[in-house]
Image (cartoon, rainbow, N blue to C red):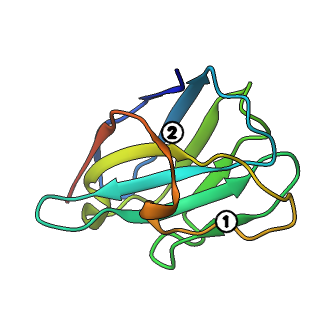
Amino acid sequence: QVQLVESGGGSVQAGGSLRLSCAASAYTYSHACMGWFRQAPGKEREGVAVVRTGGGGTWFADSVKGRFIISGDNAKTPLYLQMNSLKPEDTAMYYCAADRGGDWFSVCTLRADEYNYWGQGTQVTVSS
């Protein structure tokens, strides 16, 4: 059974940094789309950053471009989200997600409904 487990959330002041980690188990798909999503109270879940493992590309929400970095080469190593210059509007529950793999040259979407596996989430709170 595929499991995704997030860690690294916490509370930080605006302008600070956090690094989230996602460890996958029993996940064997290659050239997969893996990434980070977030959901604030009363809002829909939104894509933050995704990566095509095995040498594919990365994609970011406009709201985090230039501030967040995603890294993860394959499902056997942790998926990371380095979050810099954090803002209060970044406050949300952050989820790791993965799909069932595909072609390494294909685009990974930021749409949550395209992902098959989800972690339990880790809370990020940014105070002003």
Asked if the residue under mark 2 is in contact with the one under mark 1, i.e. CB atoms within 8 Å, the reply is no
Coordinates of residue 122 in the picture (x, y in percent): 33, 36
11 to the left or right of 37: left
Q: Nearer the viewer, residue 73 or 19?
A: 73
Q: Is mark 1 on a helix, strand or loop?
A: loop
Q: How far apart are marks 1 and 2 (CA)?
A: 22 Å
Image quarter in which the C terminus is found: bottom left
Quarter of the figure with residue 74? top right
Label 1 Cα neighbours within 10 Å, binned few <14 / some 14-19 / many ≥20: many
**Which is more toward the observer, 38 or 65?**
38
According to the image, label 2 marks what residue?
19
Q: Which of 125 and 128 is in front in this view?
A: 125
Residue on which disc 1 sits: 108
Q: Measuring 59% from the left and 69% from the top, which residue is drawn there?
A: 109
Q: From what the image shows, is residue 103 above or below residue 93?
A: below
Residue 56: where, in percent of width, then height?
A: 83, 58
Q: Which residue is drawn at 69% across and 55% down?
A: 51
* Disc assigned to residue 31: none
Amino acid type of disc 1?
Answer: Cys
Instruction: Assign a secondary structure to mark 2.
Output: strand
Q: Which is closer to the viewer, label 1 or label 2?
A: 1
Give above or below for 123 relative to 68: above
What amino acid type should be assigned to the residue bearing mark 2? Arg
> In the image, 76: left or right of 17?
right
